[in-house]
Image: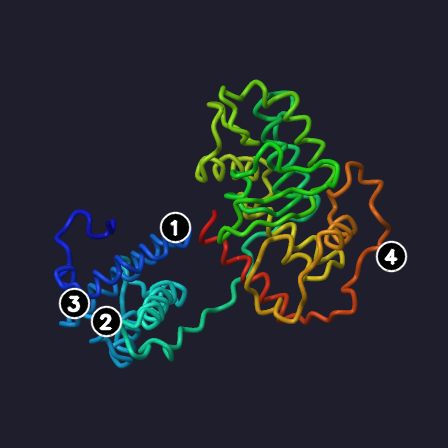
């Protein structure tokens, strides 16, 4: 079952049908049945495994034995924990261990294992806002995009991938999951089916990116595909879909070769898209819709954005939305905030949330 205990004896609570570990196994199965992402299940398993080990060292073996003071002691324990290098856990590291504990006891209460939830009032440590480390300007992005040799099969593929990342701001995993027919050239949109949390969305994709995708599909992809063709858009030299690490290394290589004094990979283009669109007057709610953020405090006051309106804002604010730069709208025609005021704190919160995605991607 759990990877953490795969090479050592099961914990003491595994022998008790009402033990913490037995209920953990049931909880993980419940998550899988409800189609939670594999990495989510694995992260919760790891975090709860650490919590169960801590509890058993103190003679706490059953969920019914866990009280609010015990959880507060565990939280204090995390504050004083030191990593192998002697440094304390960051606030985010503490939150990573506490959030699954809260979710676990909420689930136990709903399953009527507990009469009340001892974690319901557990307050998480406050995490500092983190802004993106590096963001490219529009001219710097053009230098990166010009790095691949488009006269080569792999260079043409790489140019199409870089253009797609910049044009849509999609995540690394979402680019990997793109299908051959997910790009709608007629409507100028792309259907992202492998979004975070299993959520799908349709977002605009620029004319220039579509041009390079079409050129890649017609000239390079036929040389990469290995029958049977499973319909993946971007293929490796072995005719397979990319895996995360090689894709990151590939994109990072082009960023380094551009010699901009900045580092980053796939996620760098998400930061860049958000920045250039915001600087050109796009309302932050449209950018959030582009990036697929489902739970941001700044979106709570906004209604859902239609794809048609999103496309209009995208064409007016993204530098690479058009195939030829001369067809961009004049500055005085660009879309403004549409009458919705977004203060600096909301923008900071948005970019902080965007930067937090780095922990999962690059």
**Residue ID for mark 1:** 39
Q: CA distance from mark 2 to mark 3?
A: 11 Å
Considering only order in the chain, which callout, 4 or 2, is on the residue closer to the N terminus? 2
**Residue ID for mark 3:** 56
Mark in the foreground, 2 or 4? 2
Mark in the foreground, 2 or 3? 2
Considering only order in the chain, which callout, 1 or 3, is on the residue closer to the N terminus? 1
Q: CA distance from mark 2 to mark 1?
A: 25 Å
Q: CA distance from mark 2 to mark 4?
A: 62 Å
* Marker disc for residue 63: 2
Q: CA distance from mark 3 to mark 1?
A: 26 Å
Q: Is residue 194 left or right of residue 95?
A: right
Q: Position of residue 127 (x, y in %)?
A: 45, 69
Q: Residues within 10 Å of mark 1 (few under 14, many from 20)?
A: few
Q: Residues within 10 Å of mark 2 (few under 14, many from 20)?
A: many
Considering only order in the chain, which callout, 1 or 2, is on the residue closer to the N terminus? 1
**Picture residue at 23% right of the left edge, 52% below the top:** 4
Considering only order in the chain, which callout, 3 or 4, is on the residue closer to the N terminus? 3
Residue 264 appears in the rendering: no
Q: Residues within 10 Å of mark 3 (few under 14, many from 20)?
A: some
């Amino acid at each position: 079952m759990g990877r953490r205990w795969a090479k050592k004896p099961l914990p003491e609570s595994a022998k008790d049908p009402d033990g913490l570990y037995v209920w953990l196994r049931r909880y993980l199965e419940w998550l899988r049945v409800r189609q939670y992402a594999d990495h989510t299940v694995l992260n919760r398993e790891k975090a709860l495994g650490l919590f169960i080990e801590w509890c058993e060292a103190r003679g706490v073996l059953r969920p019914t034995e866990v009280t609010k003071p015990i959880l507060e002691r565990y939280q204090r324990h995390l504050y004083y924990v030191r990593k192998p290098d002697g440094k304390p856990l960051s606030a985010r590291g503490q939150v990573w261990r506490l959030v699954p504990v809260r979710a676990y006891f909420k689930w136990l209460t709903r399953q009527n294992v507990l009469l009340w939830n001892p974690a319901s009032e557990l307050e998480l440590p406050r995490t500092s806002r983190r802004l993106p480390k590096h963001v490219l300007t529009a001219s710097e992005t053009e230098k990166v995009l010009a790095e691949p040799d488009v006269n080569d099969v792999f260079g043409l593929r790489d140019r199409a991938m870089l253009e797609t990342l910049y044009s849509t701001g999609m995540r690394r995993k979402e680019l990997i999951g793109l299908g051959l027919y997910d790009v709608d050239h007629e409507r100028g949109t792309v259907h992202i089916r492998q979004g975070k949390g299993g959520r799908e969305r349709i977002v605009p994709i620029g004319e220039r990116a579509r041009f390079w995708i079409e050129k890649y599909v017609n000239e390079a992809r036929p040389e990469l595909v290995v029958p049977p063709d499973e319909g993946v858009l971007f293929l490796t030299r072995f005719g397979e879909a990319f895996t995360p690490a090689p894709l990151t290394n590939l994109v990072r290589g082009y960023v380094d070769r551009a010699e901009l004094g900045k580092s980053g990979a796939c996620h760098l283009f998400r930061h860049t898209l958000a920045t250039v669109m915001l600087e050109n007057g796009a309302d932050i709610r449209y950018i959030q819709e582009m990036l697929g953020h489902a739970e941001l405090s700044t979106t709570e006051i906004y209604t859902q954005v239609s794809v048609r309106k999103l496309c209009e804002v995208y064409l007016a604010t993204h530098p690479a939305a058009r195939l030829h730069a001369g067809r961009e709208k004049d500055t005085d025609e660009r879309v403004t905030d549409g009458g919705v005021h977004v203060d600096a704190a909301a923008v900071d919160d948005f970019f902080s949330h965007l930067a937090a995605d780095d922990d999962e991607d690059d």
